[in-house]
Image (tube, coloured by chain):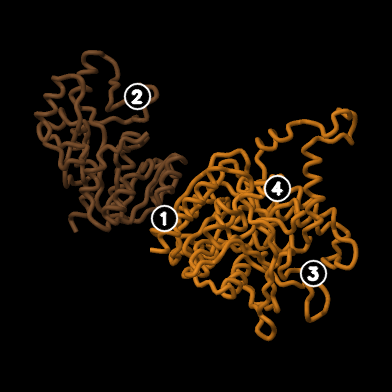
Amino acid sequence: MTKKESAKKGTVGVVKTEYFTFSYPPDYFILSNGSQIGPVTLAYETYGVLNENRSNAILILHALSGSAHAAGFHSEKDKNTGWWDLYIGPGKAFDTEKYFVICSNVLGGCSGSTGPASINPETGRAYGMDFPMVTIADMVNAQKKLIDHLGIKKLLAVAGGSMGGMQALQWTISYPDMVESCIAIATSASLSAQGIAFNEVGRQAIFNDPHWNNGNYYNSRIPKAGLSLARMIGHITYMSEKHMHEKFGRKFQDSHQGKAGVSSEFMVESYLKYQGIKFVERFDANSYIYITRAIDHFDLKEDFGGSLTAAFENVSANYLVISFTSDWLYPSSNSKEIVRALRVNGKNVNYIDIETDNGHDAFLLPNEILEKNIKNFLKSEFKKSEF
Amino acid sequence: MEEYIGYDLVVEEIPERSRVLDLGCGDGTLLFLLQENKGVNGCGVEISEEGVSRCLEKGVYSYQADIDEGLSDYRDNSFDYVILNQTIQNTKRPDLVLKEVLRIGKKVIVSFPNFGYYRIRLFLLFKGRMPVSKLLPYEWYNSPNIHLLTIKDMKRMEKEFSFKILQQQHFSLVGEGKNKIFNFIKKIVCGDPHTNKSKSCKVRIMPNLFAQYGFFVITSKKDTNQ
């Protein structure tokens, strides 16, 4: 084996994003709030092979800033892997030698799916703030169209972390007959007030950037400062205090500068700035506003008289719920609430609270316990579904 | 880590296709055996992440939780059987746990190390310190067994906790130790193991004195009146 080959072991290799467009007018896609939109395009990627029974398909749902590109590389030269490459690939948690893995960019996103940056066919200009409000359920309804298009009647699993977990849970409630199992990681049946507060500060950063211009910036300068500030705030909430301390401590970025003056920079500052700058290159500010709004409004209890138990009454999926002990954005108590509602209904549920210092971000970082449990869960669910 | 104490008796007791909740399910072996042999619909509760991970390996559903933190959201009679196998003596409030399991389970299996076992009594009598043995292998200061009880204690609770004892199968583990006298006593008080595979032998004579473990099947009196 050459060096290059060994380095690529465990990867799905070079992958290509595909696109599926549906709901051409007049057959508009109807959103939860009654408004309509069409046509709608979803960007998606698939890894592995769909088996003959079409029983090995897993839908991966991404979080706020994710995309359809969950694993592999986009070209031979590409150095950046997909966002969940640690967990998707041959021999990994979502083993592409066994399963057919699908990931699509959400409705309202900006990585190939229809969103505020897309051209509104009625005006010939980008939607901007004319884009209708989308919910997590709308994202799921759009994904359902894609799954139908791929000829899959039943998904072996829906899986995701954070907002991805919200979509996974929503899938099991919206389409109970289409989901064999659900993996919901570091997520919640509804975001806490604290979570909404942080999202709002991020949005305000964008709104207050003069270049935002009420969302009309697609032909001029983009609201870089606002969006990168929103991302910096986000990053703080994704890390635990301990993780941040261990990673950066009180170290200065440039040790020569020392405590010279107000311009001297701590490592943690330059890390956040770097994250902000990097984000602006690939993400649309309006999408950030729409998607965070969808997260804020997500509440599984809402349609069920305020009862989460009632929400899960008719689900038929088996669940794996995972939280992280140091996640303060989506704390373990949020996951426990989901588990409680499921078990009161007599549903099959596994729950693990994984001890880690990595905070909310833990699901995107290497974690043996996470990997092992996803793997084992899928293995037994696959066995049961074939039975 | 697991000794699988009394598993054979539990598997024997539970009918096919029952709905079972195993509190303190450890690595899930008991639920796995019940699934394989009796086709039960089972669920476990386990305090350690390691335990839940091991359950997942076996395809057994379980969730990480502290039993003491409550079972209150389960509906009445949700389960045909609730199992408290070598667990009740580890809980902070056995009284509250017992009340809850009697409510959520139609029948409850309670099995625990019997503190009335004569060798434990002898240890305390002659050595004058907290018994440490194969049965209770911990020092007093690091023992998870924070609420030890005897078979007689359990019987005495019948009235106050308004349950009815449906069955008692107090037992000792099969196998001989070094001391010939103790082996002889075991031989006299124990029935033969139920099957060749059995690890437990039922103690017929004065179980509170001669059984290493208590084993009760109980039910809430409120149910039996129906």
Q: Both on one chain, marks 3 and 4?
A: yes
Q: Is residue A386 left or right of residue B129?
A: right
Q: Which residue is mark 4?
A: A4
Cα separation, mark 1 vs mark 2, equals: 34 Å
The mark nearer the N terminus, 1 or 4, is 4
Q: Which residue is mark 1?
A: A343
Name which residue lies at 76% across and 68% down: A116
Q: Which residue is mark 2?
A: B138
Q: Chain of mark 3?
A: A
Cα separation, mark 4 vs mark 2, equals: 54 Å
Q: Is residue A354 left or right of residue B170?
A: right
Residue A132: % across, % down: 71, 72
The mark nearer the N terminus, 3 or 4, is 4
| Mark 4: secondary structure | helix
Q: Chain of mark 2?
A: B
Give the amino acid at mark 2: Tyr
**In this rendering, which labeled residue sits more in front, label 1 or label 2?**
2
Q: Which residue is mark 3?
A: A128
Quick check: can you spot residue A172?
yes
Q: Nearer the viewer, residue A339 or A8?
A: A8
Rendering colour (chain B)? brown
